[in-house]
Image: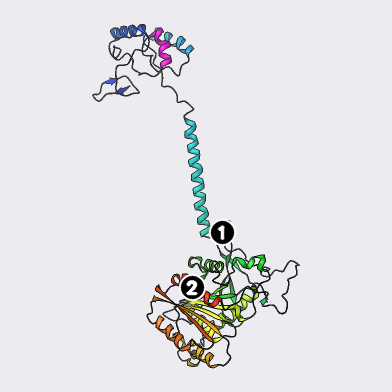
Amino acid sequence: MSHSPDGQQQPYRSEGPYQQQPPYGDAYGQQHGQQQAQQYGPPYGQQNAQPHGQQSQRYGQQYGQQAGGPYGGQNTQPYGEQDTQQFAPQYEQQYGQPHEQPHPPQSEEPRRPSRVRRWVIAGASVLALAGIAALVMNHYEIPPFTDKGEAVSFGQPPAGGDTGGAAVASPPPNSKMSMPTGPAADFKNSMTLSDGTHVAVTTLTGKKSGFKGKVWVWAPKEYNDPKFAKSGFPVMIALPGGAGYPNNYWMGTDLGLQSSISKWYSQGKSKPFILAMPVLNPGPDDKGVYWDGSDIPGQPKMGTWLTDDVPDLMRANFRTIKSRDGWAYMGSSTGGFASLKAVLKHPEKFKAAICSGPDIVPDSSLWKGHDKEKAENNPELLAKALIAKKGGPDVYLAFQVGTNESNKNTLPNVQKFIADYGKGPIHTNLRIIQGGQHNAKTYVPNMGEGPIQFISKVMEGPVE
């Protein structure tokens, strides 16, 4: 039963407001309803003789002719034809009132689409959660969702391993390439690029410097191409700015150095350089103290680390080029200074450098009291000495500087250096980046527009 707003009970109707409904049977059904109204009074009057609405067309047509009452319309679906004829008359005879039919059960058919939808939603939810979990596990380097930390050999026997009995072919005596000398370093994958190449890292204890630090390496996909299986590749040692410790920011793929080299090579602008990305200094900047990537008396020998130990690591593990024609540096800010100094100080070992927003002279406070050693690491004095040396090797220095460098003297200092020392064996190139700032995101895209082409024209590789 339900209640109207005024509190009086009214017969239950599934369709809402009570309206006069057509009779449920034929004339007998109408007559029977009137008799009930006279005998029992409301709610069995003419208006309320059909309390259930039009619920079952088939049942009302069959049962209403026999018993009249409220069973016309559409309210007979739950009972079969035989049940209607047998059960309803007995009920009326025993109780003196029409049998009220319970609500029909829900059909099973409508549940099927709902069940399918639930399964679809559940499946989609599981897949979404699995995807999120995979990303989280990859971020936190949890196997098997990442290959970070796995050994990378770059085509060489793993560290401490052997060749499995296979002979390692030696290049002919007149070959320009150098096979890996070993021992193999313990390289671990740091990240995998979209083309399947790896940035790997190892910890190197320099035999000449005595310094122990990390070096990241990367080889372009061409290095493992069977077409170049007997070829030596050029090496570029990439140095970061700032302290360059504990990481070398060039090893991250966010700056796009590795993918850019691959792109520039495919465009004919660049050599397919192997990258070596060592830490630049022995520790973070401490109250403005840094090391200039140099051998400062009483400090770790970072100059020797950069110009001897790191190149030796590359020769030990990669097919490289014997001559200096396959060796170059690049760097920004302090790394640009260290790159410039390395080529000018060791022109017999390195041929070119790309220097972005570089310092031109050493300025570490640790040089105090060591004027002689400071002068030996001053690019201006090194350039002057190289020019004065007759028959010295040619070097190629590509500079790039933004017009919005944080140090407003950077561009004038570079321009003065080129004017004073860009002669004789020192070949220079300057790219001014309009609006460019003092950061790697400015420098990388612009390298492909001039500097990388400038040095690639004079370098070799791949060579056999």
* Residue 279 at least partly seen: no
Q: Position of residue 184 (x, y in %)?
A: 66, 72
Q: Position of residue 231 (x, y in %)?
A: 66, 72
Badge 1 is on which residue?
Answer: 146
Does residue 66 belong to the magenta stretch?
yes
Q: Amino acid at mark 1?
A: Thr
Q: Secondary structure at mark 2?
A: helix
Badge 2 is on which residue?
Answer: 447
Pointer 2 and pointer 1: residues touching (CB < 8 Å)?
Answer: no
Q: Is residue 251 above or below residue 11?
A: below
Q: Secondary structure at mark 1?
A: loop
Q: Residues within 10 Å of mark 1 (few under 14, many from 20)?
A: some
Q: Earlier in the sequence, mark 2 or mark 1?
A: 1
Q: CA distance from mark 2 to mark 1?
A: 32 Å
Residue segment shown in magenta: 51-80
Q: Is residue 383 left or right of residue 405?
A: right
Q: Is residue 370 above or below residue 309?
A: below
Q: Position of residue 59 (x, y in %)?
A: 43, 14
Q: Amino acid at mark 2?
A: Met
| Badge number at residue 423 | none
User: Quadrant location of residue 171?
Assistant: bottom right
Q: Nearer the viewer, residue 334 or 418?
A: 418
* Residue 241 at least partly seen: yes
Quarter of the image with the C terminus is: bottom right
Q: Position of residue 137 (x, y in %)?
A: 52, 56
Q: Residue at x 59, y 75 (%)?
A: 235
- Specify the principal SS of the magenta part: loop
Q: Residue at x 45, y 24 (%)?
A: 105
Q: Residue at x 46, y 29 (%)?
A: 110
